[in-house]
Image: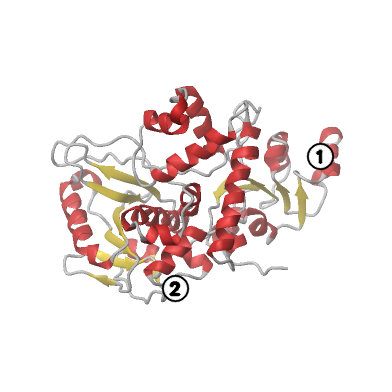
Amino acid sequence: MVAYRNRVVDAELDRRMSAMGAILIDGPKAVGKTATASQLARTVVRIDTDRAARAVLEVHPAQLFTAPTPILFDEWQERPELWNLVRRAVDDHSDKGLYLLTGSARPRDTAPMHSGAGRIGRLRMRPMSLFETGHSSGEVSLAALLQGDTPAGSPTDLTVPEIIERMVIGGWPALLDQDEPEARAWMEDYLRTVAEIDVPGLGPRRNPGNVMRLLAALGRATGTPTKGTVLEGEVGGARGPIATETLSNYLDALNRLMLVEPLPAWRPHMRSRSRLRASAVQHFVDPSIGIAALGVGARELLADLEGAGLHFESLALRDLRIYSQALNATLSSWRDSQTGAEIDMILELPDGNWAAVEVKMGEVAADAAAASLLHFAGKVDTSRHGDPSALIVITAGRFTYRRPDGVLVVPITALGP
């Protein structure tokens, strides 16, 4: 049996289990939801494979709730009626941390479900961060940076080519000990399953070839805002653009499978008149998805460092989302449509504090990134938003430091929660 690798969400799950009667852990397939939930569960019911459990659910569902708690209902979305049964079971008991639900797809909106508010907490899981896979020392805490601490810590000894290889392999627990060739074969099968089984299984018949072309189009669009008309044309190819409604259905399916996680636009109050972008920036939940959809590996990315930089941005975004989730922070991006000036990520905390982040693969680009951050911070109306808690440049480099202008430079291989 493979030893469990600790996850950043473990502590968050413990806290939520002590506060709520049930917890939903959702996220894409193969990110480790079942393994994480099983660390706490005393009973595991695998709804997707346990025919007896599904039969009991039809005729006498109360029997499923007599086992020792916490009870884990794995792949619960296969039987959406479980949601309301769990909600009712929570209402019938005063204890906390009784039930866990894990799922890799959201049920159809037509499924009759109570919101579960106040009974069922929600926790998102993503593929593993570099800190979780052991490729970041984690010595530079994101939470501490946002409190004004000066960063101190050493990165791991990964070189840029090795970091690019980690982008190709991704943060999938099944690939922890795999090299690039094995990882690429695994990712190819993963995407084929998505296109041929998972997406068509979510609703009306969908063309697997169109799904693969859409995944590739989104891979090319990683780190950029993309118009629907562009995606329609790329998916349709020589046959002509697909219908807008068809594209919407495909994107909805990828969203329900939690494979895409676009970065919404931040539209702050500015000191000067600016026409700000409202469209989201395209990102997959893990950089390996877009890279695999394009059929490239580390060698091709090293030959196209500009393209590799966009996927490196996705890598940083994945890790920041994992590290910031426990802080209840939100992430967005900013762009002035008139000047083209942009900032990769804006991190906002519940108390109103915010930070701005630029992502640059090369260390030598830190100067330009710092200048962009300072220029942007000077344009934000701080009388409404307050001063930024931190201005951060994340690199694939070696050194961690605070610049004389106050901007923090942090290697991604030193960053942690």
- Please name the residue shown 60% across and 36% down the image: 199
Residue at the left extreme, as displayed: 272
For the C terminus, the quadrant is bottom left
According to the picture, the residue beneath numbered tag 1 turns out to be 54
Amino acid type, callout 2: Ser
Lateral position of residue 293 relative to residue 2, left or right? left
Amino acid type, callout 1: Arg
Mark 1 residue crowding within 10 angstroms, few (<14) / some (14–19) / many (20+): some
Q: Is residue 11 above or below residue 20?
A: below
For the N terminus, the quadrant is bottom right
- Please name the residue shown 55% across and 67% down the image: 179
Lateral position of residue 21 relative to residue 183, left or right? right
- Please name the residue shown 44% across and 70% down the image: 138
Q: Is residue 7 above or below residue 236?
A: below
Pick whichever, 352 or 414, lies toward us.
414
Q: Position of residue 89 (x, y in %)?
A: 73, 41
Q: Where is residue 95 in the image (x, y as percent from the top left)?
A: 69, 50
- Please name the residue shown 50% across and 34% down the image: 251
Q: Position of residue 206 (x, y in %)?
A: 59, 29
Mark 2 falls on what kind of element? loop
Q: Position of residue 36 (x, y in %)?
A: 64, 59
Q: Residue 317 falls in which quadrant of the image?
A: bottom left
Q: Residue 320 falls in which quadrant of the image?
A: bottom left
Circle count:
2
Instruction: Report whether residue 407 is seen.
Output: no
Mark 2 residue crowding within 10 angstroms, few (<14) / some (14–19) / many (20+): some
Colouring mode (rainbow / by chain / secondary structure / one colour): secondary structure
Pick whichever, 417 or 362, lies toward us.
362
Residue at the front extreme, as displayed: 238
Mark 1 falls on what kind of element? helix
According to the picture, the residue beneath numbered tag 2 turns out to be 137
Lateral position of residue 105 relative to residue 352, left or right? right
